[in-house]
Image (cartoon, rainbow, N blue to C red):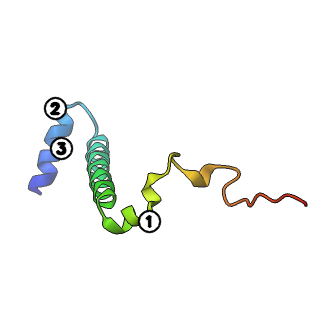
Amino acid sequence: METYEILRAVASLERKSLKEVLRSIIRDYAKKEKEKILSELHHDPLWKSIGLLDMDEEDLSERDDWGVVEWESE
């Protein structure tokens, strides 16, 4: 109950709904954890040896030609 009361007080002071305060807290936490996980992956020797994280593009699976084999007739 103490945590709930503190969160309500924060919401009141910031003139936001409790839902908005909780969303903000969760978003900040998720962002921090994502950065931590990505940092750990970049330092993992297995990922470095594969080179998977060294792609130039943000999300290769979004490209239209992803997975398409180029073929030419001889």
Between circles 3 and 1, the one closer to the viewer is 1
Find disc 3 in the rendering and name its residue.
8
- Label 3 neighbour load within 10 Å: few <14, some 14-19, many 20+: some
Furthest-bottom residue in view?
A: 46
Find disc 2 in the rendering and name its residue.
13
Q: Indicate which disc residue 50 carries.
A: 1
Earlier sequence position, callout 2 versus callout 1: 2
Q: Is residue 70 left or right of residue 66?
A: right
Which quadrant does the C terminus fall into? bottom right
Relative height, residue 11 to residue 64 (above, below): above
Furthest-front residue in view?
A: 74
Mark 2 and 1 residues: CB-CB less than 8 Å, in contact? no
Q: Which residue is found at the position 27% from the left and 45% from the top?
A: 28
- Which secondary structure, mark 2? helix
- Which secondary structure, mark 3? helix
Image location (x, y in percent) of residue 72: 85, 58
Q: CA distance from mark 3 to mark 1?
A: 48 Å
Q: Indicate which disc residue 10 carries.
A: none
Image location (x, y in percent) of residue 47: 38, 64
Q: Which residue is found at the position 29% from the left and 54% from the top?
A: 39
Front in this rendered view, residue 25 or 16: 25
